[in-house]
Image (cartoon, rainbow, N blue to C red):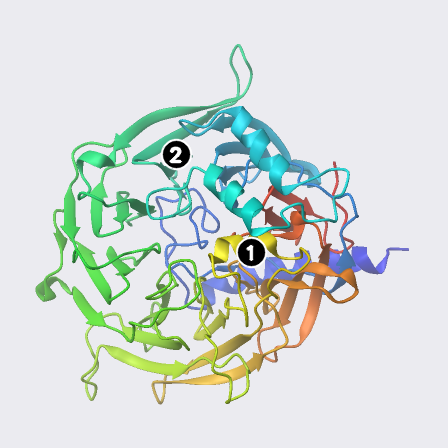
């Protein structure tokens, strides 16, 4: 007789197949033919930056084993595990290294590793030792601000505090493109050779000769004609995947900063937001244009406040696209830069008749907190979208150390550490009235620092939060997309393994959790919670 867990797992697989088979009948992002896979070949999952995946996830509650540890440990920090051209393998990307991971037969085994330029294995050992004590796996060893600052000082962060390889992409030849320092690296995997499987740097592009003085690389995305769009902190550059001379480049205001990635549509429009302006820049195939004649535009959005998030002002979200194909409203959405943020939608194309503003609609985000609440409601995370639905989280706690959110998120769970932030909210866009409305809000749900994601097949949105009650610690919670009810929970425990530290929340095609832990990615069997060797 099959167990309830086995039946739930089988049901999840069936739902996943049904979701994929019906996807052709629903509007969604146009697959980019130059990506390695339709899902997970780019940070935020697809070119529209939706943070939605097509796989079903079983409901229920489970806990990981007390001594669970990532099967593919890597130096901190691990923001995403990316698809390859084979469903048997994935690219693991961290702030210190890149790995190639075998995911066959319910496994999760690193078969090759390459340290990023300038990183020594001793540094990885030092960093891992600072955040994890194998003798006390349920205790956060970073118990003071000084220890957190020591850890961060050792990290190879880019200029401006960005994570190396934060916004990466894999092409249809299975080449991984990442930023590391002032370079864009093209990495390839070789399955054999004298020394066995290996990862090689195929080529590198020195961006220091291209970027403006004092500018840094934010990330890299892919156009629909197979070029790389490199987002700088004050620019956008189009480069061929062979790293020749840039094909197009535009620069933005010296008083602006871009800290998020970009969305790309099937017509090669690139949507990028700075701390002051939302822009649509158009790659024509020969020119990177900001001309209205080519469909480009820029628009101011509410900003100017400062708040306790990673970058402190402006939008904290990568632009996400909503509306595709024959859908009536084509939008790009962000959260704005007010202390208590709004969800903002912009018309992507021509402003419709009867409207005069590039901003199609905006609505305050309350996260269910009381009207008398005067603290910040702000986010470092992108808007998770599914159809005309949008989901946002609050990343600002009621108190902090006064140093940085990075410090606070490393301290989470230690005695005397600031409490985890609370509050999430789901919205819907009405294509008849062209307005936002709130569907539900949960002021009791914590979304500490990970990027929320949506299972389109299971109609669930996932967040990672911290709950000190009963020493529960870190949890991965699945909320019903329509009602907000908690229908899935994976309890990860109070130790540092459960801290995703700004990473993506991912699930595999069979419904297993792919948890991008601070210490490395790990595969958690769902349902059940087992972490197999």
Residue 186: quadrant of the picture: top left
Observer-nearest of 178 and 118: 118
Which residue of the protein is positioned furthest toward the top in this rendering? 194
Observer-nearest of 421 and 348: 421
**Horizontal and vertical percent position of residue 422:** 58, 72
Is residue 358 in sight in this rendering?
yes
Q: Neighbour class for label 1 at 10 Å: few (<14), some, many (≥20)?
A: many
**Horizontal and vertical percent position of residue 79:** 50, 47
Could you tell whether 114 is left or right of 14 in the image?
left
Which residue is at 47% across, 82% downward? 374
Residue 329: quadrant of the picture: bottom left
Observer-nearest of 404 and 381: 404
- What residue is pinned by disc 1? 409
Which residue is at 57% across, 45% downward? 147
Question: Looking at the figure, which quarter contains the C terminus?
Answer: top right
Residue 408: quadrant of the picture: bottom right
Q: Nearer the viewer, mark 1 or mark 2?
A: 1
Q: Neighbour class for label 2 at 10 Å: few (<14), some, many (≥20)?
A: few
Dot label at residue 173: 2
| Sequence-earlier tag: 1 or 2 | 2
Dot label at residue 150: none
Observer-nearest of 95 and 346: 95
Reply above or below: 119 against 399.
above
Is residue 430 in sight in this rendering?
no
Could you tell whether 2 is left or right of 183 in the image?
right
Reply above or below: 159 against 1.
above
Secondary structure found at label 2:
loop
**Horizontal and vertical percent position of residue 509:** 61, 51
């Amino acid at each position: 007789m099959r167990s309830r867990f086995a039946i739930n797992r089988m049901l999840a697989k069936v739902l996943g197949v049904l979701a994929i088979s019906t996807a052709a009948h629903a509007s969604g992002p146009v697959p980019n033919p130059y990506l390695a896979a339709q899902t997970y070949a780019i940070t935020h999952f697809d070119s529209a930056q939706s943070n939605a995946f097509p796989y079903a996830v079983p409901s229920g509650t489970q806990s990981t084993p007390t001594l669970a540890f990532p099967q593919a440990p890597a130096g901190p920090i691990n923001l995403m595990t990316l698809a390859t051209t084979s469903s048997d393998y994935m690219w693991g990307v961290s702030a210190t290294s890149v790995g190639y991971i075998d995911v066959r037969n319910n496994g999760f085994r690193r078969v090759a590793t390459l340290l990023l330029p300038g990183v020594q294995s001793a540094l990885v050992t030092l960093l891992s030792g600072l955040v994890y004590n194998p003798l006390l796996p349920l205790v956060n060893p970073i118990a003071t601000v000084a220890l957190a600052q020591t850890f961060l000082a050792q990290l190879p962060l880019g200029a401006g505090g960005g994570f190396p390889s934060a916004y990466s992409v894999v092409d249809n030849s299975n080449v991984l493109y990442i930023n590391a320092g002032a370079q864009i690296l093209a990495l390839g995997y070789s399955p054999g050779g004298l020394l066995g499987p290996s990862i090689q740097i195929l080529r590198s592009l020195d961006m220091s000769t291209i970027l403006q003085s004092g500018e840094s690389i934010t990330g890299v995305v892919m156009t629909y004609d197979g070029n790389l769009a490199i987002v700088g902190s004050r620019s956008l550059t189009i480069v061929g995947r062979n790293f020749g001379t840039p094909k197009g480049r535009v620069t933005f205001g010296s008083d602006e900063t871009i800290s998020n990635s970009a969305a790309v549509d099937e017509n090669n429009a690139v949507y990028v937001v700075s701390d002051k302006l939302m822009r649509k820049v158009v790659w024509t195939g020969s020119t990177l244009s900001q001309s209205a004649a080519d469909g480009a535009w820029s628009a101011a959005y509410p900003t100017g406040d400062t708040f306790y998030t990673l970058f402190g002002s402006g939008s904290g979200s990568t632009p996400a696209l909503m509306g595709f194909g024959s859908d009536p409203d084509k939008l790009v959405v962000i959260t704005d830069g007010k202390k208590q943020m709004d969800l903002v939608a912009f018309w992507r194309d021509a402003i419709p008749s009867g409207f005069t503003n590039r901003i199609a609609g905006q609505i305050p985000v309350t996260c269910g907190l009381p009207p008398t609440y005067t603290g910040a409601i702000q986010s470092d995370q992108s808007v998770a979208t599914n159809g005309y639905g949008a989901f946002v989280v609050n990343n600002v706690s009621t108190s902090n150390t006064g140093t940085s959110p990075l410090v606070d998120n490393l301290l989470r769970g230690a005695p005397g550490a600031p409490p985890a932030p609370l509050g999430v909210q789901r919205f819907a866009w009405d294509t008849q009235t062209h307005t936002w409305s709130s569907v539900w809000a949960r002021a009791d749900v914590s979304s500490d620092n990970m990027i929320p994601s949506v299972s389109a097949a299971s109609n669930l949105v996932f967040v990672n939060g911290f709950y000190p009650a009963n020493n529960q610690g870190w949890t991965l919670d699945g909320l019903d997309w329509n009602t907000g009810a908690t229908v899935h929970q994976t309890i990860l425990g109070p130790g540092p393994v459960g801290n995703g530290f700004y990473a993506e929340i991912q699930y595999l095609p069979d419904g297993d959790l792919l948890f991008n832990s601070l210490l490395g990615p790990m595969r958690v069997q769902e349902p059940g919670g087992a972490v197999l060797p």
